Image (spheres, rainbow, N blue to C red):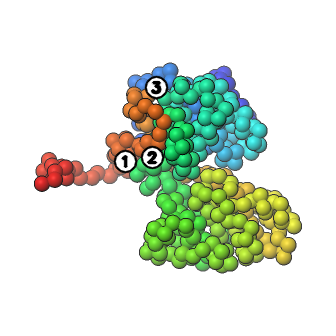
Amino acid sequence: MARRSVPHDVADLGLAEQGRARIEWSDRGMPVLRSIRERFAADRPLDGLKISACMHITTETANLMRTLHEGGAHVRIAASNPLSTQDDTAAALVGEYGISVFARYRSDRAAYQRSIDATLAVPPEIVLDDACDLVTALHTDYTDLLPGVRGGCEETTTGVVRLRAMAAAGALRYPVVAVTDSPTKHLFDNRYGTGQSTVDALLRSTNMLLAGATVVVAGFGHVGRGVAERLAGMGARVLVTEVDPARALDAVLVGYTVLPMADAARVGDVFVTVSGNRDVIGPSHFKLMKDGAVIANAGHFDIEVDAAWLVENAVAHRARVRPNVDEFVMSDGRRLMLLAEGRVANLAAAEGHPASVMDISFAVQALTVEWLLNGGAPAGGGVLEVPAEIDREVARLKLAAFGVEIDTLTDAQAAYLTSWD
C-alpha cells in the first residue's frame, strides 16, 4: 500500500511495513473489533468526526485507530507512555493507514508535551485518553477548545480517579465515559490482561523462577486480584498490602496473607504495585528490602514507586543490567532491581495485554464513540458509565467469537425479574 502524507512525528517511517505485519497479527486476535470495523467501513457513522487520542502506541491500539479511521473519523494520536511506544507500529499507522501519530520510543518530557500540542492542533470533538493527560491539557492550556468537545472516553482507573476529582470540583467541562469501569473491562482487561502481562514482564526482564518466590502485590482491586492470581498460579507465595479494609478482607478470604508494606518489605523477593496511588513503595521500604529484591510498577504513573529517591540516593546505579532492569546499590551493599524505570512494567517491559483482551476494551471504546456522536450523553461535564447495552453487545460478540452459546430468558422469566408482586 502506498504511503500517505499526513502530519506526524515518528522515529522511522521505514519501519512501516514491519509494523503493519505486527498490527495484522494482533488483528487476528481481535474479532469483535474487526466486525465493528467492517460495519464502520461500510456505514461511515463517524464521517468527518475529529478525534484526538493519547494512548499507548501498540499494535492493539493501532487496530482501534484503524476502526475509527475507517468509520470516517480524522484521528490524531500521541503516546501516553514513552516506554510503551512501538516505533514500527507508529510508522505503520502513518505510512500504511494514513493516521497522524506523534510518538517516539523513549521520548523525553519536552517531546511528550510537543506530541500533546500536535494532537490538539486540530480542535477535537471526541477525546480518547489513557490517564487523563489530554483532558488536563484541554482544561488548562487549551480551554478555548472546550466548547467544541462533545465527549470522551477514559481507559484507565488512574484517569478516572482524576476525572471524578475534576467532576466533584465542578471543573470537568464535558462528559467522559469511564470505559475502565465497564464490567467486561474489569473481567477481561484489568484482571486477566494485566495479570498475564505483568507476569510476562517479570519473566522477560529477569528470567527468574517465580515458583517459591515471595511476591508482594500492593493493591487488591481488579488489577491486583488478577496479578495475584497469575503469580499464585506460577507457584509464588503471594502477600497482599492494602489500605481499603473491604479489599483487604477479600484478599484474606481468598487465602492470601495481608500485612502492611513495612512488614512485607522485609520478606518480599518481588514487589508489584497496582494501587493507582503515589509513594506506595518509598525510602522507608527500600531500606528494609532484601539484597536482590525486584521492584515493578504495574500502575499507570511512575510515582507508585519512588524511583527518583533511588536515583538520588543509591551509591551506584547500573542501567540495563538486563533489558528493562536497572540495579541500584545501597550504602550497605544491598542491590535493588527496578523494572522499566518504575513505569508501567507490563507495557514498558513486555507487550501489554494480549490482543484478545484488548479486543474487548477497544470494541467498547469504538461503540462508545459512536454512542457519544449520536447524542447518547447528557449535556454538561461528568463521568459516565458505559451504556449497559454496549457492554452486553460486546460480551455477546466475544462469546460468539469463542464459539460459546448461552441461554436466553423466557418471557415468564423476564417478567418475573421485572415485577415486584
Q: Position of residue 301 (x, y in %)?
A: 65, 52
- The residue drawn where x is 37% and y is 47% is 395
Mark found first going from the N terminus, 2 or 3: 3
Query: Quick one: quadrant of the N terminus?
Result: top right
- Dots 1 and 2: beta carbons under 8 Å? yes
Going by the picture, which residue comes out furthest to the front?
169
Sequence-first disc among 1 and 2 = 2
**Marker disc for residue 272:** none
As drawn, the label of residue 46 is 3
Q: What residue appears at the point 58 percent right and 60 percent down from the top-left corner?
A: 274
- How much space separates mark 3 and mark 1, taking CA atoms? 23 Å
Can you identify the residue that label 1 sits on? 395
Q: In this rendering, does residue 234 appear at all?
A: no
Query: Position of 101 compared to 357: left or right?
Result: right
Secondary structure at numbered mark 2? helix
Name which quarter of the figure residue 368 lies in: top left
Q: Is residue 182 visible?
A: yes
Q: Residue at x 46, y 25 (%)?
A: 46
Quarter of the figure that contains the C terminus? bottom left
Q: Which residue is mark 2?
A: 360
